[in-house]
Protein backbone atom coordinates (compact mmCIF):
# COMPACT_ATOMS: atom_id res chain seq x y z
CA UNK A 1 0.00 0.00 0.00
CA UNK A 2 1.47 3.28 -1.10
CA UNK A 3 1.58 6.16 1.35
CA UNK A 4 0.94 9.65 0.09
CA UNK A 5 3.78 12.02 0.78
CA UNK A 6 2.83 15.09 2.76
CA UNK A 7 3.03 18.25 0.69
CA UNK A 8 6.07 20.28 1.67
CA UNK A 9 5.40 23.69 3.09
CA UNK A 10 6.88 26.47 1.02
CA UNK A 11 9.31 28.59 2.92
CA UNK A 12 7.83 32.01 3.61
CA UNK A 13 10.07 34.88 4.56
CA UNK A 14 8.45 37.33 6.93
CA UNK A 15 8.30 40.82 5.38
CA UNK A 16 10.06 42.36 8.39
CA UNK A 17 13.29 40.70 7.29
CA UNK A 18 13.32 43.00 4.27
CA UNK A 19 13.31 45.93 6.69
CA UNK A 20 16.22 44.33 8.55
CA UNK A 21 18.10 44.02 5.26
CA UNK A 22 17.35 47.66 4.34
CA UNK A 23 18.58 48.80 7.75
CA UNK A 24 21.81 46.82 7.33
CA UNK A 25 22.31 48.47 3.92
CA UNK A 26 21.71 51.87 5.50
CA UNK A 27 24.18 51.18 8.33
CA UNK A 28 26.88 50.02 5.90
CA UNK A 29 26.37 52.99 3.57
CA UNK A 30 26.70 55.48 6.43
CA UNK A 31 29.02 53.97 9.02
CA UNK A 32 31.82 53.03 6.62
CA UNK A 33 32.19 56.57 5.17
CA UNK A 34 31.83 58.10 8.65
CA UNK A 35 34.56 55.80 9.99
CA UNK A 36 36.87 56.81 7.11
CA UNK A 37 36.11 60.51 7.68
CA UNK A 38 36.77 60.41 11.42
CA UNK A 39 40.03 58.48 10.98
CA UNK A 40 41.22 60.86 8.29
CA UNK A 41 40.28 64.02 10.22
CA UNK A 42 40.27 63.49 13.97
CA UNK A 43 40.31 67.20 14.91
CA UNK A 44 36.75 68.31 15.63
CA UNK A 45 37.60 71.96 14.92
CA UNK A 46 38.19 71.18 11.25
CA UNK A 47 35.76 68.27 11.12
CA UNK A 48 32.60 70.06 12.30
CA UNK A 49 31.47 73.21 10.47
CA UNK A 50 28.48 75.56 10.64
CA UNK A 51 25.48 74.00 12.45
CA UNK A 52 27.39 70.85 13.39
CA UNK A 53 30.11 72.93 15.03
CA UNK A 54 27.54 74.79 17.12
CA UNK A 55 26.00 71.60 18.49
CA UNK A 56 29.39 70.05 19.22
CA UNK A 57 30.66 73.13 21.08
CA UNK A 58 27.48 73.28 23.17
CA UNK A 59 27.81 69.55 23.91
CA UNK A 60 31.39 70.15 25.08
CA UNK A 61 30.13 72.79 27.51
CA UNK A 62 27.52 70.40 28.89
CA UNK A 63 30.09 67.60 29.18
CA UNK A 64 32.37 69.95 31.11
CA UNK A 65 29.58 70.69 33.60
CA UNK A 66 28.64 74.13 32.23
CA UNK A 67 24.82 74.20 32.21
CA UNK A 68 24.49 77.98 32.37
CA UNK A 69 23.20 77.99 28.75
CA UNK A 70 25.41 81.03 28.10
CA UNK A 71 25.78 79.85 24.51
CA UNK A 72 22.38 81.47 23.93
CA UNK A 73 24.06 84.87 23.89
CA UNK A 74 25.73 83.91 20.62
CA UNK A 75 23.39 81.25 19.23
CA UNK A 76 19.91 81.89 20.69
CA UNK A 77 18.31 79.72 17.99
CA UNK A 78 19.98 76.51 19.22
CA UNK A 79 18.05 74.11 21.46
CA UNK A 80 19.66 71.90 24.15
CA UNK A 81 18.36 68.35 23.52
CA UNK A 82 20.79 67.18 20.82
CA UNK A 83 23.83 68.73 22.59
CA UNK A 84 22.74 67.02 25.83
CA UNK A 85 22.67 63.64 24.04
CA UNK A 86 26.07 64.30 22.45
CA UNK A 87 27.49 65.43 25.80
CA UNK A 88 26.53 62.07 27.29
CA UNK A 89 28.36 60.30 24.46
CA UNK A 90 31.42 62.53 24.94
CA UNK A 91 31.55 61.62 28.63
CA UNK A 92 31.12 57.90 27.99
CA UNK A 93 33.62 57.64 25.10
CA UNK A 94 36.20 60.28 26.06
CA UNK A 95 35.31 62.44 23.06
CA UNK A 96 35.26 59.77 20.35
CA UNK A 97 34.10 61.46 17.10
CA UNK A 98 32.90 58.22 15.53
CA UNK A 99 30.65 57.54 18.52
CA UNK A 100 29.27 61.08 18.25
CA UNK A 101 28.39 60.58 14.59
CA UNK A 102 27.01 57.12 15.32
CA UNK A 103 24.21 58.64 17.41
CA UNK A 104 22.14 60.01 14.51
CA UNK A 105 22.70 56.86 12.47
CA UNK A 106 21.26 54.75 15.28
CA UNK A 107 18.35 57.20 15.68
CA UNK A 108 17.37 56.74 12.03
CA UNK A 109 17.66 52.95 12.29
CA UNK A 110 15.54 52.87 15.45
CA UNK A 111 12.97 55.21 13.88
CA UNK A 112 12.58 52.81 10.96
CA UNK A 113 11.54 50.00 13.30
CA UNK A 114 9.37 52.41 15.30
CA UNK A 115 7.49 53.28 12.11
CA UNK A 116 7.06 49.57 11.39
CA UNK A 117 5.67 48.91 14.88
CA UNK A 118 3.22 51.85 14.84
CA UNK A 119 1.91 51.23 11.32
CA UNK A 120 1.53 47.49 11.95
CA UNK A 121 -0.55 48.18 15.07
CA UNK A 122 -2.54 50.86 13.26
CA UNK A 123 -3.53 48.89 10.13
CA UNK A 124 -2.78 45.26 11.10
CA UNK A 125 -0.84 45.11 7.83
CA UNK A 126 2.77 43.96 7.98
CA UNK A 127 3.52 44.52 4.29
CA UNK A 128 2.37 48.16 4.34
CA UNK A 129 4.35 48.75 7.54
CA UNK A 130 7.52 47.27 6.05
CA UNK A 131 7.14 49.17 2.77
CA UNK A 132 6.84 52.55 4.47
CA UNK A 133 9.67 51.81 6.90
CA UNK A 134 12.02 50.84 4.08
CA UNK A 135 11.16 54.00 2.16
CA UNK A 136 12.13 55.98 5.26
CA UNK A 137 15.36 54.14 6.12
CA UNK A 138 16.64 54.29 2.53
CA UNK A 139 15.44 57.84 1.85
CA UNK A 140 18.04 60.33 0.56
CA UNK A 141 16.99 62.77 3.30
CA UNK A 142 17.79 60.33 6.12
CA UNK A 143 21.10 59.43 4.47
CA UNK A 144 22.20 63.02 3.83
CA UNK A 145 21.44 64.20 7.36
CA UNK A 146 23.39 61.45 9.04
CA UNK A 147 26.47 61.10 6.84
CA UNK A 148 27.26 64.77 6.17
CA UNK A 149 26.32 66.70 9.30
CA UNK A 150 25.64 66.56 13.02
CA UNK A 151 22.17 68.10 12.99
CA UNK A 152 18.80 67.83 14.72
CA UNK A 153 16.79 66.38 11.82
CA UNK A 154 17.17 62.65 12.68
CA UNK A 155 16.03 63.13 16.28
CA UNK A 156 13.25 65.43 15.08
CA UNK A 157 11.98 62.79 12.62
CA UNK A 158 11.88 60.12 15.32
CA UNK A 159 10.05 62.37 17.76
CA UNK A 160 7.53 63.46 15.12
CA UNK A 161 6.77 59.84 14.24
CA UNK A 162 6.07 59.23 17.94
CA UNK A 163 3.93 62.37 18.15
CA UNK A 164 1.81 61.41 15.14
CA UNK A 165 1.31 57.87 16.41
CA UNK A 166 0.27 59.15 19.83
CA UNK A 167 -2.05 61.77 18.32
CA UNK A 168 -3.82 59.07 16.29
CA UNK A 169 -4.09 56.96 19.45
CA UNK A 170 -5.51 59.91 21.38
CA UNK A 171 -8.05 60.76 18.67
CA UNK A 172 -9.17 57.13 18.61
CA UNK A 173 -9.37 56.39 22.36
CA UNK A 174 -9.18 59.84 24.02
CA UNK A 175 -7.25 58.42 26.97
CA UNK A 176 -5.41 60.63 29.43
CA UNK A 177 -2.28 58.48 29.08
CA UNK A 178 -2.03 59.09 25.33
CA UNK A 179 -2.57 62.83 25.89
CA UNK A 180 0.22 63.02 28.48
CA UNK A 181 2.62 60.95 26.38
CA UNK A 182 1.85 63.09 23.32
CA UNK A 183 2.61 66.25 25.30
CA UNK A 184 5.92 64.82 26.55
CA UNK A 185 7.02 63.98 23.02
CA UNK A 186 5.98 67.44 21.76
CA UNK A 187 8.03 69.04 24.52
CA UNK A 188 11.08 66.94 23.60
CA UNK A 189 10.68 67.89 19.95
CA UNK A 190 10.64 71.58 20.88
CA UNK A 191 13.78 71.06 22.97
CA UNK A 192 15.33 69.60 19.82
CA UNK A 193 14.28 72.26 17.27
CA UNK A 194 12.79 75.73 17.58
CA UNK A 195 10.11 75.08 14.97
CA UNK A 196 8.80 72.41 17.33
CA UNK A 197 6.92 75.39 18.76
CA UNK A 198 4.71 75.37 15.64
CA UNK A 199 4.18 71.63 15.94
CA UNK A 200 3.18 71.86 19.61
CA UNK A 201 0.81 74.78 19.11
CA UNK A 202 -0.85 73.00 16.18
CA UNK A 203 -1.29 69.82 18.21
CA UNK A 204 -2.94 71.74 21.05
CA UNK A 205 -5.36 73.31 18.57
CA UNK A 206 -6.23 69.86 17.17
CA UNK A 207 -6.77 68.48 20.69
CA UNK A 208 -9.21 71.26 21.56
CA UNK A 209 -10.95 71.31 18.18
CA UNK A 210 -11.46 67.54 18.16
CA UNK A 211 -13.24 67.76 21.52
CA UNK A 212 -15.52 70.55 20.28
CA UNK A 213 -16.24 68.64 17.06
CA UNK A 214 -17.19 65.57 19.08
CA UNK A 215 -19.80 67.60 20.93
CA UNK A 216 -21.13 69.04 17.70
CA UNK A 217 -21.44 65.69 15.88
CA UNK A 218 -22.44 63.45 18.78
CA UNK A 219 -25.99 64.15 20.07
CA UNK A 220 -25.19 62.26 23.28
CA UNK A 221 -22.54 64.84 24.20
CA UNK A 222 -23.62 68.38 25.03
CA UNK A 223 -21.64 71.30 23.62
CA UNK A 224 -21.17 72.58 27.17
CA UNK A 225 -19.44 69.39 28.31
CA UNK A 226 -17.45 69.20 25.06
CA UNK A 227 -16.24 72.78 25.50
CA UNK A 228 -15.30 72.10 29.12
CA UNK A 229 -13.42 68.96 28.08
CA UNK A 230 -11.61 70.87 25.32
CA UNK A 231 -10.48 73.60 27.74
CA UNK A 232 -9.39 71.20 30.48
CA UNK A 233 -7.49 68.84 28.18
CA UNK A 234 -5.78 71.61 26.23
CA UNK A 235 -4.87 73.49 29.41
CA UNK A 236 -3.46 70.32 30.97
CA UNK A 237 -1.34 69.65 27.89
CA UNK A 238 -0.03 73.23 27.81
CA UNK A 239 0.89 73.15 31.51
CA UNK A 240 2.79 69.87 31.16
CA UNK A 241 4.51 71.17 28.03
CA UNK A 242 5.49 74.46 29.71
CA UNK A 243 7.06 72.64 32.67
CA UNK A 244 8.99 70.20 30.50
CA UNK A 245 10.37 72.93 28.24
CA UNK A 246 11.77 75.03 31.10
CA UNK A 247 15.36 74.04 30.12
CA UNK A 248 14.78 76.17 27.02
CA UNK A 249 12.39 78.89 28.19
CA UNK A 250 13.93 79.75 31.57
CA UNK A 251 17.47 80.59 30.30
CA UNK A 252 15.94 82.69 27.52
CA UNK A 253 13.95 84.57 30.11
CA UNK A 254 17.13 85.13 32.16
CA UNK A 255 19.20 86.37 29.21
CA UNK A 256 16.59 88.08 27.01
CA UNK A 257 13.46 88.46 29.21
CA UNK A 258 11.58 86.47 26.55
CA UNK A 259 10.97 82.72 26.99
CA UNK A 260 10.69 82.12 23.24
CA UNK A 261 13.41 84.45 21.97
CA UNK A 262 15.37 82.88 19.09
CA UNK A 263 17.38 85.79 17.78
CA UNK A 264 17.71 86.73 14.13
CA UNK A 265 15.77 83.74 12.78
CA UNK A 266 12.60 85.31 14.20
CA UNK A 267 13.04 88.01 11.57
CA UNK A 268 12.23 85.44 8.90
CA UNK A 269 8.59 85.99 9.88
CA UNK A 270 8.46 89.66 8.91
CA UNK A 271 11.65 90.12 6.91
CA UNK A 272 11.59 90.70 3.15
CA UNK A 273 14.79 88.81 2.37
CA UNK A 274 17.30 86.42 3.88
CA UNK A 275 20.09 88.96 4.44
CA UNK A 276 17.72 91.63 5.70
CA UNK A 277 16.31 89.21 8.25
CA UNK A 278 19.75 88.15 9.51
CA UNK A 279 21.39 91.60 9.49
CA UNK A 280 18.55 93.65 10.93
CA UNK A 281 19.70 95.45 14.11
CA UNK A 282 16.21 95.21 15.61
CA UNK A 283 13.41 92.69 15.91
CA UNK A 284 11.22 93.08 12.83
CA UNK A 285 7.44 93.33 13.22
CA UNK A 286 4.39 93.24 10.98
CA UNK A 287 4.54 97.06 10.80
CA UNK A 288 8.06 96.84 9.30
CA UNK A 289 6.86 94.40 6.65
CA UNK A 290 3.76 96.35 5.61
CA UNK A 291 5.69 99.61 5.34
CA UNK A 292 6.97 98.37 1.98
CA UNK A 293 4.43 95.64 1.11
CA UNK A 294 0.71 95.44 0.44
CA UNK A 295 -1.75 92.77 1.45
CA UNK A 296 -1.49 91.41 -2.09
CA UNK A 297 2.27 91.04 -1.63
CA UNK A 298 1.60 89.07 1.55
CA UNK A 299 -0.87 86.79 -0.25
CA UNK A 300 1.62 86.25 -3.07
CA UNK A 301 4.38 85.44 -0.59
CA UNK A 302 2.22 82.89 1.20
CA UNK A 303 1.13 81.24 -2.07
CA UNK A 304 4.74 81.06 -3.27
CA UNK A 305 5.85 79.52 0.02
CA UNK A 306 2.96 77.03 -0.05
CA UNK A 307 3.84 75.99 -3.60
CA UNK A 308 7.42 75.32 -2.52
CA UNK A 309 6.78 73.42 0.73
CA UNK A 310 3.81 71.37 -0.47
CA UNK A 311 4.59 70.74 -4.15
CA UNK A 312 8.22 71.44 -5.07
CA UNK A 313 10.38 70.38 -2.13
CA UNK A 314 9.00 66.90 -1.21
CA UNK A 315 9.53 65.20 -4.61
CA UNK A 316 12.82 67.07 -5.05
CA UNK A 317 14.22 65.86 -1.72
CA UNK A 318 13.02 62.29 -2.35
CA UNK A 319 14.48 62.14 -5.91
CA UNK A 320 12.16 59.19 -6.67
CA UNK A 321 8.91 60.50 -5.12
CA UNK A 322 7.22 57.19 -4.28
CA UNK A 323 6.51 58.32 -0.72
CA UNK A 324 5.14 61.67 -1.86
CA UNK A 325 2.78 60.19 -4.46
CA UNK A 326 1.60 57.45 -2.10
CA UNK A 327 0.91 60.04 0.61
CA UNK A 328 -1.26 62.00 -1.82
CA UNK A 329 -3.19 58.80 -2.43
CA UNK A 330 -3.55 58.32 1.33
CA UNK A 331 -4.91 61.84 1.73
CA UNK A 332 -7.53 61.18 -0.96
CA UNK A 333 -8.49 57.86 0.69
CA UNK A 334 -8.80 59.45 4.13
CA UNK A 335 -11.20 62.01 2.69
CA UNK A 336 -13.28 59.66 0.56
CA UNK A 337 -13.50 56.94 3.21
CA UNK A 338 -14.36 59.46 5.94
CA UNK A 339 -11.56 58.38 8.28
CA UNK A 340 -11.81 60.89 11.16
CA UNK A 341 -8.40 60.29 12.75
CA UNK A 342 -6.58 60.72 9.43
CA UNK A 343 -8.66 63.79 8.59
CA UNK A 344 -7.53 65.35 11.85
CA UNK A 345 -3.99 64.28 11.00
CA UNK A 346 -4.26 66.16 7.71
CA UNK A 347 -5.48 69.24 9.55
CA UNK A 348 -2.56 68.89 11.98
CA UNK A 349 -0.10 68.70 9.09
CA UNK A 350 -1.49 71.73 7.26
CA UNK A 351 -1.71 73.80 10.43
CA UNK A 352 1.90 73.24 11.52
CA UNK A 353 3.11 73.94 7.96
CA UNK A 354 1.48 77.38 7.68
CA UNK A 355 4.33 79.29 9.41
CA UNK A 356 6.89 77.41 7.31
CA UNK A 357 5.00 78.27 4.11
CA UNK A 358 4.96 81.95 5.10
CA UNK A 359 8.66 82.12 5.97
CA UNK A 360 9.98 79.92 3.14
CA UNK A 361 10.45 82.73 0.57
CA UNK A 362 12.85 84.33 3.08
CA UNK A 363 14.48 81.27 4.64
CA UNK A 364 15.33 79.45 1.42
CA UNK A 365 16.62 76.11 2.78
CA UNK A 366 14.27 73.19 1.91
CA UNK A 367 15.41 70.88 4.71
CA UNK A 368 13.33 72.59 7.40
CA UNK A 369 9.89 72.23 5.71
CA UNK A 370 10.70 68.75 4.39
CA UNK A 371 11.71 67.54 7.86
CA UNK A 372 8.25 68.69 8.99
CA UNK A 373 6.61 66.94 6.01
CA UNK A 374 8.20 63.50 5.77
CA UNK A 375 6.73 62.00 8.98
CA UNK A 376 3.21 62.85 7.82
CA UNK A 377 3.94 61.39 4.39
CA UNK A 378 4.83 58.09 6.05
CA UNK A 379 1.43 57.71 7.70
CA UNK A 380 -0.62 58.74 4.66
CA UNK A 381 1.51 56.54 2.39
CA UNK A 382 0.91 53.61 4.78
CA UNK A 383 -2.84 54.22 4.48
CA UNK A 384 -2.54 54.17 0.68
CA UNK A 385 -0.47 50.96 0.65
CA UNK A 386 -2.90 49.30 3.06
CA UNK A 387 -5.91 50.04 0.86
CA UNK A 388 -4.06 48.97 -2.29
CA UNK A 389 -3.25 45.65 -0.62
CA UNK A 390 -6.88 45.22 0.47
CA UNK A 391 -8.01 45.88 -3.09
CA UNK A 392 -5.47 43.38 -4.47
CA UNK A 393 -6.51 40.68 -2.00
CA UNK A 394 -10.18 41.18 -2.82
CA UNK A 395 -9.49 40.96 -6.55
CA UNK A 396 -7.32 37.86 -6.21
CA UNK A 397 -9.69 35.99 -3.89
CA UNK A 398 -12.20 34.86 -6.61
CA UNK A 399 -9.39 33.44 -8.76
CA UNK A 400 -8.07 31.51 -5.76
CA UNK A 401 -11.52 30.04 -5.13
CA UNK A 402 -11.83 28.94 -8.78
CA UNK A 403 -8.39 27.31 -8.64
CA UNK A 404 -9.37 25.20 -5.61
CA UNK A 405 -12.56 23.84 -7.19
Image (tube, grey):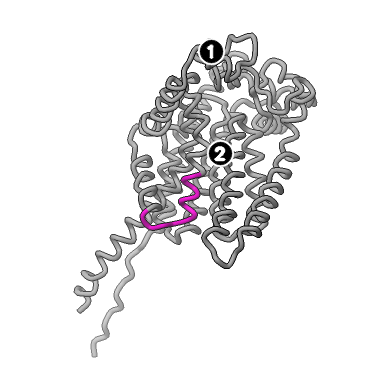
Rate crowding at label 2 as few (under 14), some (14 to 19) or many (20 or more) other CA atoms within 10 Å.
Answer: some
Place of residue 68 in the rendered image (x, y in percent of width and height, measured from the top left): 79, 24
Query: Mark 1: which secondary structure?
Result: helix
x then y, percent, for residue 225: 65, 59
Mark positioned earlier in the residue sequence (1 or 2)? 2
Q: Which mark is residue 56?
A: none
In-front residue for pair 117/70: 70
- Of residues 140 and 207, which is closer to you in this image? 207
Badge 2 marks a residue whose secondary structure is: helix
State the extent of the magenta-drawn residues as a range.
336-347
The image's mark for residue 291 is 1
Q: Quadrant of the C terminus?
A: bottom left
Residue 193 against residue 166 in the figure, above or below: above
174, 131: nearer the viewer: 174
Q: Marks 1 and 2, how far apart in space? A: 49 Å
Compared to residue 369, the image places residue 158 above or below, namely below
Answer left or right for 228 relative to 15: right
Can you say which quadrant of the picture contains the N terminus?
A: bottom left
Answer left or right for 255 relative to 215. Answer: right
Q: Residue at x 55, y 19 (%)?
A: 270
Residue of label 2: 106
| Residue 48 visible in the displayed image | no
Q: Quadrant of residue 283?
A: top right
Q: Residue at x 57, y 26 (%)?
A: 150
Residue at 64 percent of width and 54 percent of height: 227
Q: Is residue 35 left or right of residue 378?
A: right
> In terms of image quadrants, where is residue 156?
top right
Residue 107 percent across, percent down from the top left? 56, 39
Does the magenta segment cover residue 337?
yes
Residue 229 vertical placement versus 328 (above, below): below
Q: Mark 1 or mark 2, which is nearer to you?
A: 1
Amino acid sequence: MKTLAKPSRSLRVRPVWFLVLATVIYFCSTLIPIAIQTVRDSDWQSYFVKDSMHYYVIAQQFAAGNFSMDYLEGWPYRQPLLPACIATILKLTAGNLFAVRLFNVLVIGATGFLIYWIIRRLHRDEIAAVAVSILFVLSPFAYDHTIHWLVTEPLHLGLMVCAIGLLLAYLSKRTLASLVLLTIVLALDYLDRTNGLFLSASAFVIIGASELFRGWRNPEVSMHSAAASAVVRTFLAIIIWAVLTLPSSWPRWVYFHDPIYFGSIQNFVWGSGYLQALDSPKQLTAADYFQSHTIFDAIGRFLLGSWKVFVIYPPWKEIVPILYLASLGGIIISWRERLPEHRWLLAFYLLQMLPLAWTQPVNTTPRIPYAATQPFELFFAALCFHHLLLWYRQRSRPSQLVATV
